[in-house]
Amino acid sequence: MLNIIEALRSPSVAERFPTFRKFEIGDVLFASFSCPSSGQWEANWAEHDRIVHVLSGRKSLRAVGGTWEVGPGDTIFLKKGACFLRQRGADDICLFMFFIPDGFVRAAVREIAPDLPVLPPPADHRDMLIHINDDAGVKAFLQAMTVFFSNPGTPPELLLKLKLKELIASIVVSASNSTLSGYLRSVASTNVPSIPAIMEANCCHNLPIEAFAKLSGRSLSSFKREFRQHYGISPGKWLLERRLECSAHLLTTTSISVTEIVFECGFEQPSHFSRAFKAKFGQTPSEYREACAAAA
């Protein structure tokens, strides 16, 4: 699966997207680009949260929590992890993307925390996508980034950091973006993401164990050790069990094909899926579906 941060940082990205612009400050990445429509669902993942602003074109996005449609003028927040994207129509889509590491969010929120009113605990918002209402603070940030991307030079790092910190502060105190405010405050309240939350949100995506370690903000060895302490088994075994459970659920509750279920549940090959499914349930996926339908 494509790591979109690595792809946007690649030296060859400008060859694929002639209008591509980017600014980098350590792990923080600001990008502006247009891409043509393929008409296919395309999977990607990122180890950092991202804000996406659509300038033109339309996309469908599928991830934990549902499917969403975004179009010109929409601004969304995508949590770290994997998702599927598909462009709608033949037109190119033009985007701003801002990748924000947890460390930057923590520093920005904790800096203003003494001046914040006492707020209720953030809600447990499990959807991967949060719509952002373009209030005055969000509009000011987008206007500034439009100017920066339109000019040939690179803005000073201090100015880019300041604009992003202002955006985070604006969202945290915004009454119109309370869901995202709660999420950002929850990020600031911990030093590393929750392993169970990361695993549940991304278990049905075909990601390597190294990607799960990155998403959880840990080294591979620390991730494996803490995972086993929490679940009592290895990440690989847990992922296989969860993906098989997910596939069994889809077989009995939907009419989508077995091939589609392979894709939906994070398996690489249909043959591997069929072998693993039969080893767990004693039947092939098709036999299992037929038996459950007959028993209903």
Image (cartoon, grey):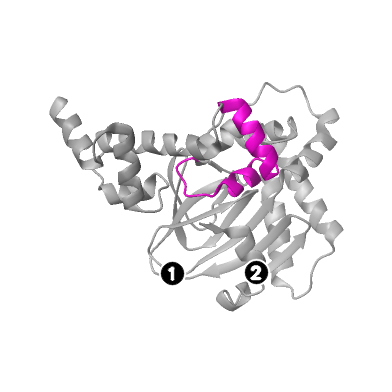
Amino acid bearing label 2? Ser
Please give the name of the residue rendered at 64% of the width and 26% of the height, measured from the top-left corner.
122
**180 relative to 60 in the view: left or right:** right
Measuring from the top left, give residue 137's x and y in whole percent. Answer: 71, 46
Please tell me which residue lies in front, 12 or 50: 12
The residue range painted magenta reads 203-231
Residue 88 location (% of width, % of height): 39, 61
- The amino acid marked with disc number 1 is Asp
**Image x and y of residue 272, in percent:** 36, 49
Q: What residue did someone put label 2 on?
A: 10
| Quadrant of residue 150 within the rendered picture | bottom right
Q: Are marks 1 and 2 in contact (CB under 8 Å)?
A: no
Q: Is residue 240 above or below residue 21?
A: above
> Relative to residue 234, is residue 60 depicted above or below?
below
Please tell me the numbered disc located at residue 91: 1
Q: Is residue 272 above or below residue 241?
A: below
Q: Would residue 27 be visible to someone looking at this image?
A: yes
Looking at the rendered image, the disc whose residue lies closer to the viewer, 1 or 2, is 2
The reply to whether residue 194 is in sight is: no
Q: Is residue 230 magenta?
A: yes
Sooner in the amino-acid sequence: mark 1 or mark 2: 2
How would you rate the neighbour count of disc 1 (Cα within 10 Å): few for under 14, some for 14-19, many for 20 or more? Answer: some
159 lies left or right of 54: right
